[in-house]
Image: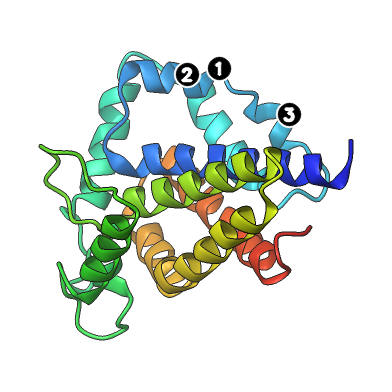
């Protein structure tokens, strides 16, 4: 397999993980989504030597392996408590909105971060689907967009259009720095104070490990 094909495969894998995280943060999981995740091979992923994702996958796999008839409700209660802002710590919530965390000062919903993401999505002729009452700077939409950029870059590289592929990757790097790296660690730290289940602790660990790897990858120009 040549280097170009390796780059394409890496981009597809990154896109898949972005989409998975987008789904996990979007809303409480359905029974079908829980079963689909449970069928994933988290056990083998958790035992990969020196993998930064091992602990996260161990938590996800361990939690789902013990699922029962009340798991859907248990996870939904933890999700809504933590990420809908029902639980607080020192007056702060763990709602996954960039506007709440990026400033480092007073939390502000629908702040400048939301406007920036809105403008970027509009520039790409994208928008939050009708009927979804969430601002554009929700982490789910941010991850979904980054996954889309990975897929677009992979498609362009696969077709031999390297210049446009590199331009897409540059867009991704800039967006990641501005709208993920600028606040994600603060969100994860707050989230750890809010979540109560092993599953969502695993989600936060997976987010932290993936974002750290992604940051290093983007700083190195997309090369491992």
Judging by the rendered image, the residue that carries numbered circle 3 is 44
Vertical placement of residue 196 versus 109, above or below: above
Vertical placement of residue 190 versus 28, above or below: below
Picture residue at 68% right of the left edge, 67% below the top: 216
Picture residue at 53% right of the left edge, 35% below the top: 60
Residue 97's label in the rendered image is: none
Distance, label 1 to label 3, CA atoms, is 12 Å
98 or 203: nearer the viewer: 98
Picture residue at 76% right of the left edge, 36% below the top: 47
Dot 3, crowdedness within 10 Å: few (<14), some or many (≥20)? Answer: few
Q: Secondary structure at mark 1?
A: loop
Q: Quadrant of the N terminus?
A: top right
Vertical placement of residue 72 versus 196, above or below: above
Q: Disc count in the image?
A: 3
Q: Position of residue 63 (x, y in %)?
A: 49, 30
Picture residue at 81% right of the left edge, 50% below the top: 50
223 or 65: nearer the viewer: 223
Residue 36's label in the rendered image is: 2
Q: Counting residues from the N terminus, which is met first, the one under dot 1 or under dot 3? A: 1
Mark 2 in CB contact with mark 3 (< 8 angstroms) = no
From the viewer's perspective, tell me whether residue 85 is left or right of residue 144: left
Q: State the scheme by which the image is colored.
A: rainbow
Judging by the rendered image, the residue that carries numbered circle 1 is 39
74 or 176: nearer the viewer: 176
Residue 151 visible in image = yes
From the viewer's perspective, tell me whether residue 140 is left or right of residue 136: right
């Amino acid at each position: 397999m040549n280097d170009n094909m390796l780059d394409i495969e890496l981009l597809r894998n990154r896109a898949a993980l972005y989409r998975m995280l987008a789904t996990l943060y979007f809303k409480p999981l359905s029974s079908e989504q829980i079963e689909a995740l449970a069928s994933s091979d988290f056990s083998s992923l958790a035992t990969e030597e020196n993998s930064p994702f091992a602990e996260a996958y161990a938590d996800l796999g361990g939690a789902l392996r013990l699922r029962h008839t009340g798991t859907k409700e248990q996870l939904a209660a933890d999700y809504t408590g933590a990420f809908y802002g029902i639980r607080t710590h020192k007056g702060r919530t763990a709602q996954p909105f960039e506007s709440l965390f990026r400033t480092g000062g007073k939390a502000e919903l629908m702040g400048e971060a939301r406007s920036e993401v809105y403008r970027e999505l509009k520039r790409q002729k994208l928008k939050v689907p009708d009927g979804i009452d969430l601002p554009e700077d929700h982490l789910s939409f941010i991850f979904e967009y980054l996954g889309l950029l990975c897929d677009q870059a992979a498609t362009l590289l696969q077709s031999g259009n390297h210049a446009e592929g590199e331009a897409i990757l540059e867009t991704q790097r800039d967006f990641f720095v501005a709208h993920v790296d600028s606040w994600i660690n603060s969100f994860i730290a707050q989230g750890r104070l809010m979540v109560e289940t092993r599953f969502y602790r695993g989600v936060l660990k997976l987010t932290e490990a993936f974002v750290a790897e992604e940051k290093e990858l983007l700083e190195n120009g997309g090369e491992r």
